[in-house]
Image (cartoon, coloured by chain):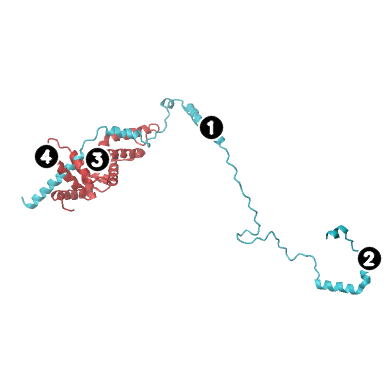
């Protein structure tokens, strides 16, 4: 036997002995009752929820009336319960609302000054005619010079000065 | 094993699912336990992994009818669960697991000295398996299950059959080298 062949056979033997160990692990006996424990765990698992089934006695023959009655009873219970809850719920207290002053129509831009309700009057309207104060004064002085003292007397006779009451003058 | 097809009447469907699941437990629980044990090397952890596997099946029991090969499908699930558990539970050192497992392995008809020697040999083999690259190690562990063909191993690992064969070849060579020279680095 040459060395390489001897080495290969030794390698094979080593590999085989290694696989034998793994095979022993792969054939280890399973603990007793494993299946039962798994089944019981599956039954108690939360994901194993079952859908309610109609009893088999009701499933045969004319069961539509019974089903309808049962469905109506379920609807009655659900609606009744809902109404009971609804009727016992007190309405929430009204929230206090602070009324904000109404904004002026033409001034909605935040941060700007308001016009305080002033309205712009267009220049096209005919307003009251104002005389010039200087011209008015000249007219009055001309009247004075023409009338003189006689004019004054006549004017006083026309519009006598009202006499102040005594009480009022005493207070002032 | 008979799996109820999708045409089962609505009323009978829950019962059909339960029966199908119970049948799967009866048929494959032992195999799944061994697969989990070969990775986890702990009885309690392996049982937990099997239970988790069937809980996952329970959650997806509507798809049972669409599965072609239930055995490969279940082994794949328990394989992934076990790998995940082993990855997370790195609290105990590997040497403790190996020596404990080596003592557990059957040694009928051997004397006390031979038993000690056999246990040492098993421990050495398991230590060498741990030193293999992950891909080669996985194929080697699964190939120890005589009921699994290379096609089924490929199905479990999600690779082609040819890559399973090449990995197995490399794994055997590496194992031989490691056992020949235990201190050699791969």
Work out whether residue A140 or residue B51 is closer to the camera in this orientation and state it.
Answer: A140
Label 4: which residue? B114
Q: Are marks 1 and 2 in contact (CB under 8 Å)?
A: no
Is residue B1 visible to the viewer in this orientation of the structure?
A: no
Distance in Å between CA atoms under marks 3 and 4: 24 Å
Q: Which residue position is annotated with label 1?
A: A80
Mark 2 vs mark 3: same chain?
no
Q: Position of residue A68 (x, y in %)?
A: 49, 29
Density class for disc 4 (Cα within 10 Å; few <14, some 14-19, many ≥20) is few
Foreground: disc 1 or disc 2? 2
| Tint of chain A | cyan
Identify the element where label 4 is drawn: helix
Residue at mark 3 to residue at mark 1: CA–CA distance:
57 Å
Mark 3 sits on what residue?
Answer: B42
Residue A137's image quarter?
Answer: bottom right
Q: Which of the two marks, 1 or 4, is nearer to us in this view?
A: 4
Looking at the picture, do discs 4 and 2 lie on one chain?
A: no
B52 horizontally vs A95: left or right: left
A68 relative to B149 in the view: left or right? right
Query: How far across and how far down the image is residue B68, in percent?
Result: 30, 40
For this rendering, which residue is in front, B23 or A123? A123
CB within 8 Å, label 2 to label 3: no
* Real-space Cα separation, disc 1 to disc 4, in angstroms: 80 Å
Q: Secondary structure at mark 3?
A: loop
* Tags 1 and 4 both on a single chain: no
Q: Position of residue B91 (x, y in %)?
A: 27, 45
> In this figure, which residue is indicated by the disc labeled 2?
A157
Which chain contains the residue that carries disc 4? B
Q: Secondary structure at mark 1?
A: helix
* Distance from the alpha carbon under mark 1 to that under mark 2: 100 Å
Residue A6 visible from this viewpoint: yes
């Amino acid at each position: 036997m040459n060395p390489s062949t001897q080495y290969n056979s030794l390698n094979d033997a080593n590999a085989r002995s290694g696989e034998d160990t793994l095979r022993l692990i792969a054939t280890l006996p399973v603990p007793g009752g494993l299946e039962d424990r798994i089944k019981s765990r599956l039954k108690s698992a939360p994901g194993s929820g079952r859908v309610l089934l109609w009893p088999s006695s009701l499933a045969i023959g004319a069961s539509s009336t019974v089903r309808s009655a049962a469905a109506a009873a379920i609807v009655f219970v659900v609606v009744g319960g809902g109404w009971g809850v609804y009727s016992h719920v007190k309405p929430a207290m009204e929230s206090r609302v602070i009324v904000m002053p109404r904004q002026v129509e033409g001034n909605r831009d935040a941060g700007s000054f308001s016009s305080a309700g002033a309205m712009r009057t267009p220049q096209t309207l005919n307003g009251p005619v104002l005389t010039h104060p200087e011209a008015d004064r000249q007219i009055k002085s001309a009247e004075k010079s023409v009338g003189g003292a006689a004019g004054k007397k006549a004017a006083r006779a026309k519009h006598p000065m009202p006499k102040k009451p005594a009480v009022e003058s005493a207070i002032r | 094993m008979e799996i109820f097809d999708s045409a089962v009447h609505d009323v009978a469907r829950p019962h059909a699912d339960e029966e199908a699941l119970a049948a799967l437990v009866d048929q494959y629980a032992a195999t799944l336990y061994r697969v989990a044990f070969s990775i986890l090397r702990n009885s309690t952890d392996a049982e937990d992994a099997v239970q988790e596997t069937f809980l996952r099946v329970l959650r997806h029991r509507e798809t049972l009818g669409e599965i072609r090969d239930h055995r490969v499908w279940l082994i794949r699930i328990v394989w992934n669960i076990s790998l995940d558990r082993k990855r997370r539970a790195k609290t105990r050192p590997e040497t403790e697991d190996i020596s404990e497992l080596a003592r557990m392995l059957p040694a009928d008809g051997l004397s006390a000295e031979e038993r000690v020697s056999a246990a040492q040999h098993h421990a050495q083999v398991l230590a060498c398996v741990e030193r293999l690259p992950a891909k080669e190690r996985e194929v080697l562990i699964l190939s120890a299950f005589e009921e699994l063909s290379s096609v089924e191993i490929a199905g479990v690992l999600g690779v082609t059959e040819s890559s399973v064969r090449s990995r197995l070849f490399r794994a055997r060579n590496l194992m031989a080298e490691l056992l020949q020279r235990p201190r050699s680095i791969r």
